[in-house]
Amino acid sequence: MRRVSITIFIFLVGFHNIIWANELTRKERELKEIGLHLREAILSHDATVILKYVANDGIPCVDGIIPYDKILNDLKNRNSWLYCYLFSSEVFEKQYKDDLYPMSLDSYFMKAVNVQIEVSFMKDNDKVISDYGCIYYKSSNMEYAPEICFFLKNGKWTFTDSPYNCN
């Protein structure tokens, strides 16, 4: 009887791991699709797609939340950091470029070759937190790899502080 119990336990643990791996793979696929969608939106200067990934209450930052209305206004303001980072390489290079953000995303996508999207999930004491994931755009001709992170909240992926400069 004991051997049967151990076998059933091992089977259930293995089954749980298969379900967990499938969920992680599904979430990784979702984030890669979002990454492709964002890349297309950035290259076509489509701010409406960007707004799809902003939570109703805004984007969390270090000391609070950037409200949705401010993000909307920043996406309309051709001189704001957010607009320039996403869509205006020339202005970004002149006014906002720094060590953390050496180029705008549109500039990156125009110059990058063989862009691959990699996904990483947050870990807490070696436990994967699958509701917090980041995408990294990696290119064969650049060391810089832009990162955009997301929370899965109420079944919807939304931005964390990235792509907003909270400084």
Image: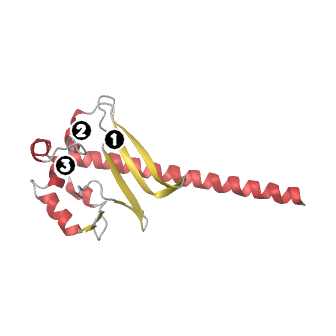
Kind of residue at disc 2: Tyr
Residue assigned mark 2: 108
Element carrying mark 2: helix
Tell me whether the residue at label 2 lies in contact with that at label 1, contact meaning CB atoms closer than 8 angstroms.
yes
Q: Around disc 1, counting alpha carbons within 10 Å, would you say few (fewer than 14), some (14 to 19), or many (20 or more)?
A: many
Seen at 10% across and 58% down, the residue is 77
Kind of residue at disc 3: Tyr
Determine the CA span between mark 3 and mark 1: 15 Å
Element carrying mark 3: helix
Kind of residue at disc 1: Tyr
Figure label count: 3
Residue 59: quarter of image: bottom left
Residue 160: quarter of image: bottom left
Residue assigned mark 3: 85
Q: Is residue 165 left or right of residue 10?
A: left
Seen at 36% across and 51% down, the residue is 34
- In the picture, the disc for residue 137 is 1
Residue 87 x %, y % = 17, 47
Determine the CA span between mark 3 and mark 2: 10 Å
Determine the CA span between mark 2 and mark 1: 9 Å
Residue 10 x %, y % = 75, 54
Q: Nearer the viewer, residue 94 or 20?
A: 94
Tell me whether the residue at label 3 lies in contact with that at label 1, contact meaning CB atoms closer than 8 angstroms.
no
- In the rendered image, the vertical position of residue 87 relative to residue 6, given as above or below: above
Q: Around disc 2, counting alpha carbons within 10 Å, would you say few (fewer than 14), some (14 to 19), or many (20 or more)?
A: many
Residue 90 x %, y % = 10, 41
